[in-house]
Image: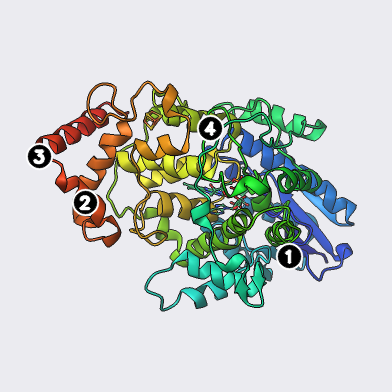
């Protein structure tokens, strides 16, 4: 009797813990395209196409590695629509002696898997996901008893654990963190790096047709689909990033430019999160670029910090905070997301650019997600759960373990400051400093009141004013509140009236 090994759509690695130590001939790998996973939120069409095509290519890679793969397609007339339903059908087909599975990336799916042993009367071995560098246990040990879960201290532990960018126990370059060097605006230039484009092959074309037909009412466009869908092509994109973009990654990490969705970013998150690339390998290769003198420390440290620090840290928070985390709403925000989140059709150039690009490509970079779209949703008082669901839907790299703490926690302050000691809010001045958006906007970034005033300006003060009871004692915001209080009464009332009028028309 074989061992049944279900491999989920974000577990596309040959080094998966569920396959470790097994003889390929003793295993039936089960891969399941299931309706429930494609619709539990209305994923962007490109996200579904990416995952299904990468799954189909990975099934081929498993077969080439000697495994027997039982692959259930979405259009299988017998399909049961859920992971649990497919496990039941696979048990009937293969009569396995046990199930071995790598833990999933979501509470919802974890609950399903935990029910299988009782439901099917078979031993179910749920293994830790060793693609991550920090186990649940290690994160708990680090977090327990701390007053604040500051990412920077977690990150230093991870540097010590892995030895990355350490010189005899000391941080390479003399500092742990070079973030202050990484805040420069950029100018568009002809020699900017461009991510590689991967033409759809026959498998991808078949998936694109399926998605176009079946998910026509989902957000986003399928046009110009050019994601890598194999480990080999994801590796090509990684190599291109290290060769062409890493040296300036740090300097321009926070910059935004019109018509330039990718800038000096790696665009590797979809591949990391679905298993086509390995996080430690990318960190080691980034360090090698620094050691060889091909990339400066601020870029390499910044890049490694995102993966070794932030990525591992948000995962730790997700599992530590539990399935109720998604319900937190510290600021009691209740506004529905404006309808233009689904079209990008707004006069605010920064949001039109960031949302438009998101709907077209399924990608936006960190500062667009945090300081343009997230900043607006927070200032406007949008319901953090709705904001979370939007991010989970529209980004190709979005799985709940990584998306939820970033959105509800870091961006919407829904947890009251677990991930950051103050909300990430800014007026138009920040967006103007870091981008070229404002120059072509219908609004004037310098104005706070009047028909042409940039909405971010009044919304910023309105947010601070209306949340004084919850944020007023935060010492990191004291200076900002002092600036607000220094303005005369008429000026403050004018700004608040401007924000109220904007919000009244914001639907
Ligand atoms: P780069 O800028 O090249 O960064 C390198 C790598 O670091 C990324 O590939 C990613 O794996 C990792 N990384 C960077 N920042 C973070 C972070 N804050 N958390 C976790 N990993 C990080 N990232 C996701 O992978 N999935 C998400 O669903 C997601 N949702 C987000 C929602 C919000 C509101 C915000 C503010 C950030 C979110 N991020 C998410 C983090 C970040 O925006 C993306 O990882 C990044 O834009 C991916 O593009 P890149 O590969 O070019 O990243
Ligand atoms: C996101 C997604 C989608 C759209 N479709 C599938 C699918 O058909 N089959 C599958 O195995 N996984 C899919 N996924 C990814 C899962 O939702 C993901 O594995 C869970 O969220 C657990 O992390
Ligand atoms: Fe955005 Fe305001 Fe600048 Fe327009 S003026 S792009 S709304 S920050």
- Marks 4/2: CA–CA distance: 31 Å
Q: Is residue 476 left or right of residue 63?
A: left
Mark closer to the chain start, 4 or 3? 4
Mark 4 to mark 1 CA distance (whole Å): 43 Å
Please state, as top left, top right, bottom left or bottom right, where the C terminus lies in the image.
Answer: top left
Label 2 sits on a secondary structure element that is: helix
Relative horizontal placement of residue 337, taking residue 261 as reference (left or right): left
The residue drawn where x is 84% and y is 47% is 60
Answer with mark 3 or mark 1, whichever residue precedes in sequence: 1
| Alpha carbon distance from label 4 to label 3 | 37 Å
Q: Which of 386 and 114 is in front in this view?
A: 386
Judged from the image, the secondary structure of the residue bearing numbered disc 1 is helix
Nearer the observer: mark 4 or 1; the answer is 4
State the image coordinates of residue 124 (x, y, percent, origin top left). 67, 68
Dot 1 corresponds to which residue? 18
Cβ atoms at labels 4 and 3 below 8 Å apart: no
Q: Earlier in the sequence, mark 1 or mark 2?
A: 1
Question: Mark 3 Cα within 10 Å, few/some/many (few <14, many 20+)?
Answer: few
Q: Do the residues labelled 2 and 3 touch (CB within 8 Å)?
A: no
What residue is drawn where x is 74% and y is 33%? 197
Residue underneath mark 4:
257
Q: Name the residue under label 3.
A: 489
Position of the N terminus, as image quadrant, is bottom right
Q: Nearer the viewer, residue 266 or 330?
A: 266
Q: How many labels does the image show?
A: 4
For marks 4 and 1 on the same chain, the one whose residue lies earlier in the sequence: 1
Instruction: Name the quadrant containing residue 190.
Output: top right
In-image side of 315 versus 46 (left or right): left
Residue 305 rendering spot, x and y as whole percentages? 58, 59
Place residue 186 in its image quadrant. top right
Q: Residue 481 carries which label?
A: 2
Classify mark 4: residues with Cα within 10 Å, few (<14), some (14-19) or many (20+). some
């Amino acid at each position: 009797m074989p061992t049944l090994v279900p491999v989920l759509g974000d577990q596309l690695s040959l080094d998966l813990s569920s396959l470790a130590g097994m003889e390929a001939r003793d295993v039936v790998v089960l891969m399941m395209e299931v309706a429930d996973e494609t619709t539990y939120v209305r994923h962007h069409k490109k996200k579904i196409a990416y995952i299904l095509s990468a799954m189909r290519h990975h099934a081929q890679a498993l077969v080439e590695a000697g495994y027997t793969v039982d692959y259930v397609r979405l259009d299988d007339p017998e399909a049961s629509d859920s992971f649990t339903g497919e496990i039941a059908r696979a048990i009937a087909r293969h009569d396995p002696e046990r199930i071995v599975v790598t833990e999933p990336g979501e509470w919802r799916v974890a609950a399903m898997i935990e029910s299988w042993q009782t439901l099917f009367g078979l031993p179910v071995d749920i293994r830790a996901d060793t693609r991550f560098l920090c186990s649940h246990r290690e994160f708990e040990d680090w977090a327990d008893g701390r007053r604040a879960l500051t990412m920077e201290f977690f990150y230093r532990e991870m540097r010590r654990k892995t030895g990355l960018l350490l010189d005899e126990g000391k941080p390479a370059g003399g500092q742990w963190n070079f973030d202050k060097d990484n805040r420069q605006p950029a100018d568009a230039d002809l020699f900017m790096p461009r991510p590689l484009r991967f033409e759809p092959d026959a498998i991808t074309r078949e998936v694109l047709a399926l998605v176009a037909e079946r998910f026509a009412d989902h957000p986003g466009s399928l046009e110009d689909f050019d994601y890598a869908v194999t480990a080999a092509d994801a590796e090509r994109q990684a190599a291109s990033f290290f060769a062409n973009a890493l040296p300036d990654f740090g300097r321009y990490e926070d910059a935004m430019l019109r018509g330039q969705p990718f800038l000096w970013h790696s665009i590797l998150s979809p591949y990391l999160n679905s298993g086509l690339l390995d996080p430690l390998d990318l960190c080691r290769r980034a360090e090698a670029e620094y050691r060889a003198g091909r990339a400066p420390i601020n870029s390499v440290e910044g890049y490694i910090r995102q993966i070794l620090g932030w990525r591992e840290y948000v995962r730790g928070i997700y599992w530590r905070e539990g399935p109720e985390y998604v319900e937190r709403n510290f600021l009691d925000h209740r506004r529905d997301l404006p309808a233009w989140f689904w079209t990008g059709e707004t006069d605010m150039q920064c949001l039109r650019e960031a949302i438009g690009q998101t709907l077209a490509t399924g990608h936006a970079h960190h500062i667009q997600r945090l300081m343009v779209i997230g900043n607006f949703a927070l200032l406007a008082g949008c319901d953090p759960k709705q904001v979370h669901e939007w991010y989970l839907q529209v980004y190709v790299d979005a799985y709940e373990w990584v998306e939820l703490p970033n959105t509800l926690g870091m961006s919407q302050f829904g947890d009251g400051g677990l991930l950051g000691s103050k909300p990430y809010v800014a007026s138009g001045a920040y967006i103007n400093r870091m981008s070229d958006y404002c120059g072509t906007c219908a609004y004037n970034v310098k104005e706070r009141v009047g028909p042409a005033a940039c909405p971010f300006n009044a919304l910023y003060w309105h947010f601070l004013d209306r949340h004084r009871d919850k944020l007023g004692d935060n010492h990191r915001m004291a200076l900002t509140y002092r600036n607000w209080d220094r303005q005369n009464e008429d000026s403050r009332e004018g700004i608040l009236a401007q924000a109220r009028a904007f919000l009244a028309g914001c639907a």
